[in-house]
Image: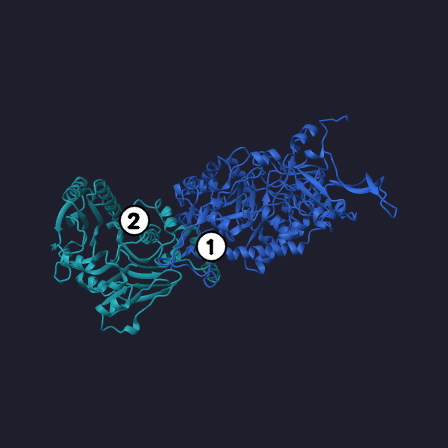
Chain colours: A blue, B cyan
Amino acid sequence: MATMRVNELAKDDFFWQIEYKHDRCTLCGRCVAACPFKAIEARVERRRKVVSDDITPNPKVIFQTVPVIKQVVNEYNFCRGCGICEKVCPNDAIRPVRNPDHRFQAKYRSVTGDPFKRGGRNNLVTSARTLDKIKIGRISQMTDPSLDAQRHTFDLLAPFGRVLPPQEIPFEIKDGKLVEREHTPPVRWIYPIIIGDMSIGALSWRMWEALAIATAYLNEEAGIPIRMCTGEGGVPVRLLKSRYLKYMILQIASGHFGWNRIINAMPEMVEDPAGILIKIGQGAKPGDGGLLQAKKVAKHIQEIRGVPKADLLSPPNHQGLYSIEESVQKMFLSFNAAFKFRVPVAIKVAASATSVSVYNNLLRDPYNIVGGFFLDGIDGGTGAAHEISLDHTGHPIVSKLRDCYLAAVHQGKQGQIPLWAAGGMGKGWNLAADAFKMICLGANGIFTGKLMLQLAGCVGNDNGKCNACNTGLCPVGICTQNPILVKRLDIDKVAENIVNYFLSVDHELKKLMAPIGNSSLPVGRSDALIATDKAVADRLKIQYAC
Amino acid sequence: MCRIGAIKSKNYLHPSKALYLMRSQQKGHDNSGFAMVMQDLGGVFENYKDLPILSLACTDRGMKIADDILHEAGFVRMMQWTPEVHPRDWLKIEPMPNYIFEVVQYPKSYKYASKDEKEELLVDMRLKIRQALEENHEGYVYSFWPDVITLKEIGDPTDIGEYFGLWEENDELKAKIITAQCRQNTNYDIVRYAAHPFFLQGYTALANGENTFYEKNKNFQEKLYKGYIGFESDSQCFLYTLHYIHKILKWPLIYYKHVITPLPFEDIEKREDREVLKKIRASLAHLEINGPNTIIGVLPDGTLFTCCDSKKLRPVVVGYTDDTVIITSEVTGINELLPERNWEKDIYPHEREMVVINNNLEVERWQQ
């Protein structure tokens, strides 16, 4: 009887198993060349073969050494199921197959002594999303006619910046007209969907550039004043000095990566940035800092961020800030002052049971300098994280956004610090519907990240497919700095896809606003929504319909 | 649909004018009610211009409750007038037992009080009486303000006129400004408070249409001023916004239009006052209205105006002679009352316009 070591890793332990059809394979080698994880390799096998050389059948058994493609079995080169091998195979000879009986996370941890890390979103949620249980139910055609999405004009803009209550705006009346007596906080009117913060470094420079190109195109050619948040990690100096900076929201997170360069470039900026976003936390791994592993810290990333080639961890908190009062006084004030109070400064926090307290606190801020409250929910996530954080920490965004809005309503301060929310927006591929529903629930706008990557060709999904953003081996060149992999990404095509997607979103938003008879954003119009789930209806205080 | 109308004249008019104005538009409303506010009063109220008048529809007990509250606060009754009613079996009307218009003197302690203090007192008293009457459904208080009376009733407007004897002109009840509406609101229950015109501290507003931003408006207005209550109708929001902009913020009337129907951003950007307009748009986003609307408003000084939603989806027309101006939903109403006017001067306001009539009956057209 053969000896067997039960604790050794076997193909059966993996999430994904390679299904290989020997008889279809021409041994062209494309799959092996394309797999960035080195999860397959060319090997030889000893095969038994029955042959007959005579005119009449005369079978003989021979043994032959044949070349084959085999799955690698170790903890470091496991198949992520990205399916690139299948995409490049000319003969349908190879593909990854999901293994429902895997036990890889246990094996991985028990061998490496290290938490399992990956990118992507939560891999546990399989039920329908809350937003999908909500419909836009107020459609009136007799008393309040629907508008015509093609003919009527719509104002699809949302404020970004601190909005003063009317009695605090320093107006005086001159010749029967209101005039401003002194400076007020800057408010920018922008598209209600922001391309969310994904850093240069987490993304390949080509992907980041594609986003920036799409943003500029949408603004300058398509008339959609969308903004892009840079994420933590700095901005290429060429962009800082360009006129396109006005479309970029500069992010500062707890690692302050890249800010040295931004500050140095300030004297040469010809445009103010669209805003500053102070990232306190993010939704997909709340309470964790950012994680950029050394293998992704390429030379140009080292330069932009001003760091050596090492793992880059943004701490989970801003070192030196241990209270919201400090945040307001130090961070908001200093960033407002840095740009001479011309640029809105907003904050991003992870949705949490305490979000409402934070929001209330900011609403009461006596300095009027918090220009937006970005709330990020559990379903967000583009970068690398510990799996345990992705799957098991965080807070759904919908109810928390609603809580914050209603807290503002309770104080009569709705709209004063614009609410922006994200976390799984566009997860069902319909960003416009998600945006519209969130706006009706009280958001001024939303931000979206991962969907942009998926538009660019990300092959990952929420069922554990690929999710290798952390490895620096992104098979489609989106989340890697490896020059060979990055070249797989066609910048122009990605930018085009994103632009096209937003053109359709813009059209779809109008298609949703028209039937409820609104020509401007229906912020807080929860009466337009119905929930097909009683619990959702009760929790969000919207109508239940069945 | 509601049908709304306002008459402003240099001469005192009898409310039968308002009834005729409305009746000619009968096909546009459903005969479920009639309501009116009369301002700048003549007839029996002419000599009490500076004294507050309580307009009340109530039970006997409700009358006592209201009197007790006023008495306790130090108000002294100067005069009380009740319309003579003509109940008939066939009248389609759901009347209250009593209709009271009571003129009172301010409490002695308010002898040297400022105008603002008196105005706040009147709101406080009205809210207090309203709350007390609501407890056992004892009645409705519509207005408590100098030189203003309000009547609201559920039923067929023709029959309501019959019941109160309003079809025949007499010298008892007269006013220079009368606003009126036929039909109750459709959005919610038919209750007396839900009928236009709505009145607060000298401001009157009526609307024909649908306020699709009702929930936004309401959620915001509830925190702005104690008098912003009720919300039985989405049209009440128009009154509260008018009051807030003009009375509380003290902004010029033109900004009412900028708040409720802000210019599109691309138009704002072309204007010199763009920064001001954007500030207003951001700050008062929750007072914007959407949906089809026509609004008629009256200011405390008697200024009358009308404006429409930003798509001009509800009708309104202004017709006038030298001594009378009428704003109403359909031109047929004006034809009925002012057949000799020059109809070529009738104004059909557009979506960016306010038509404003001052106390000299000069008609101005303000472009937003």
Q: Tag on residue A512? A: 1
Look at label 1 and name its amino acid: Leu
Percent x, y of residue A539: 43, 39
Of the 4 image quadrants, the one containing the N terminus of chain A is top right
Asked if residue A242 shows in the view, the reply is: no
* Disc 1: CA contacts within 10 A as few (<14), some (14-19) or many (>=20): some
Instruction: Identify residue type, mark 2.
Output: Glu
Cα separation between marks 2 and 1? 28 Å
The numbered disc on residue B232 is: 2
Is residue B296 in view from this perspective?
Answer: yes
The foreground one among A14 and A243 is: A14
The single residue placed furthest to the right in the displayed view is: A54
Q: Which residue: 30% across, 54% down?
A: B186
The x and y percentages for residue A174 are 39, 58
Q: For this view, does A157 lie left or right of residue B243? A: right
Q: Are marks 2 and 1 on the same chain?
A: no
For the residue pair B43 and B168, the one nearer the viewer reads as B168
Give the number of the mark in front: 2 or 1.
1
Q: Quadrant of residue B367?
A: bottom left
Q: How many circles with numbers are drawn on the protein?
A: 2
Residue B12 placement (x, y as % from top left):
17, 63
Q: Is residue B206 left or right of residue A334?
A: left
